[in-house]
Image (cartoon, rainbow, N blue to C red):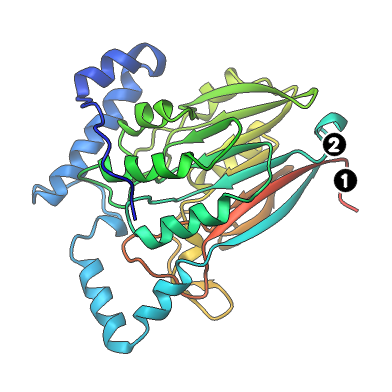
Amino acid sequence: MYPPPEDWPTWDDDALINRYGGRLGWSHLSRRLALERAQANLFEGFGTPFVHLENLVNLPGLLRLLLKVSGLYPRGRRTGCQPEVVDHPVYHRKIPRSLDGLRILHLSDIHADMSPANLHALIEAVRPLEYDLAVLTGDYRARTSGSWQAAADGMRALMQHVSGPVWAVLGNHDPLVMLPVLESLGVQVLMNEAATVEVAGGQLCFAGVDDAHYFCCADLYRTLAVADTECFTILLSHTPELYRDAAHLGFDYYLCGHTHGGQICLPGGIPVITEANCPRRLVSGPWQWGGMCGYTSRGTGMSILDVRFFCPPEIVIHELRYGMPP
């Protein structure tokens, strides 16, 4: 079950602008807040200039009914509460020898208010893991509009069991208010920003962009300008859709999610729908584009429906290795 509701502060648009205007810039803030209002208007019947699958109001009920009639609904819910832990080695010549063996926990698409059972299973799976630091690649709320407090409560419960420094980006489900929420939980959120980390006697650079799927607020050039690319540079993006530009600009490693690996897949993990404008080989797992390596997480949560088929949730630990793969 979720923890008791937290009495979160109320952040209206003016409060967010006053707090983050200088850091993010007016153009970035105004676009994000305007599109958040567009999402809210959709659910109030006023329409929106963008159509995304997760915004179709009547879809979840219809799909849930079909699954219940078919008898598949219980199976899908069980799969959605059985996260897999994946150890993924990352080889690169820019990784310092001192960071060889560094372990990075990667969680994505948590959708912390979607399913109490899923959140509990995630916490139980994360609790015993050993790693040095963590990254979160967006989508902390289940819906794309409406209340965010339940998602904030769920993230608070999860972060009590995530150790070490944590860096994150926002996704297309996340309102701007999730920025102060995550910061209050000790998470450093990167909004077209970068941070150089000193750990285990070496340096590592995390670069993070805002959502590129719905809000279209990602700015790779601004991010690159403040990134220390002399270090091994890991780009955090909610979606894999920036793969081409990121590779062209010289980022070393690209971590993302958004696709859920399809969430509802055919046997063999073949996604029915990906909801991402990228080649299918970038929809889940490790990939390479030009000189840049990447990894798209299947995510730990669910959206639209609290089910998964042939696509279990995924907790990834990326282990940095100096040099080339054997």
The part of the image, by quadrant, that contains residue 120 is bottom left
SS under mark 2? loop
Q: Where is mark 1, residue-wise?
A: 324
Q: Nearer the viewer, residue 71 or 242?
A: 71
Residue sitting at x 72%, y 53%? 88
Amino acid type at circle 1 is: Met
**Are the residues at dot 1 and dot 2 in contact (C-beta closer than 8 Å)?**
yes
Whether residue 278 can be seen here: no
The three-letter amino acid code for the residue at tag 2 is Arg
Mark 1, secondary structure of its residue: loop
Give the camera-side residue of 133 and 244.
Answer: 133
Q: Position of residue 143 (x, y in %)?
A: 28, 51
Classed neighbour count for the residue bearing mark 1: other residues with Cα under 10 Å, few (<14), some (14–19), many (≥20) = few
Residue at 65%, 47% (x, y): give it: 294
Horizontal and vertical percent position of residue 38:
19, 41
Left or right of residue 151: residue 124: right
Q: Is residue 218 left or right of residue 144?
A: right
Q: Quadrant of residue 223?
A: top right
Task: Name the residue at 28% across, 44% down.
Answer: 4
Between 256 and 114, the one lying in front of the other is 114
For the N terminus, the image quarter is: bottom left
Farthest residue, direction bottom: 70
Looking at the image, which residue sits at the far front? 4
Instruction: Kindly indicate the quadrant of the structure image that contains residue 63.
Output: bottom left
User: Mark 1 or 2 closer to N-term?
Assistant: 2
The residue under label 2 is 93
Q: Nearer the viewer, residue 281 or 324?
A: 324
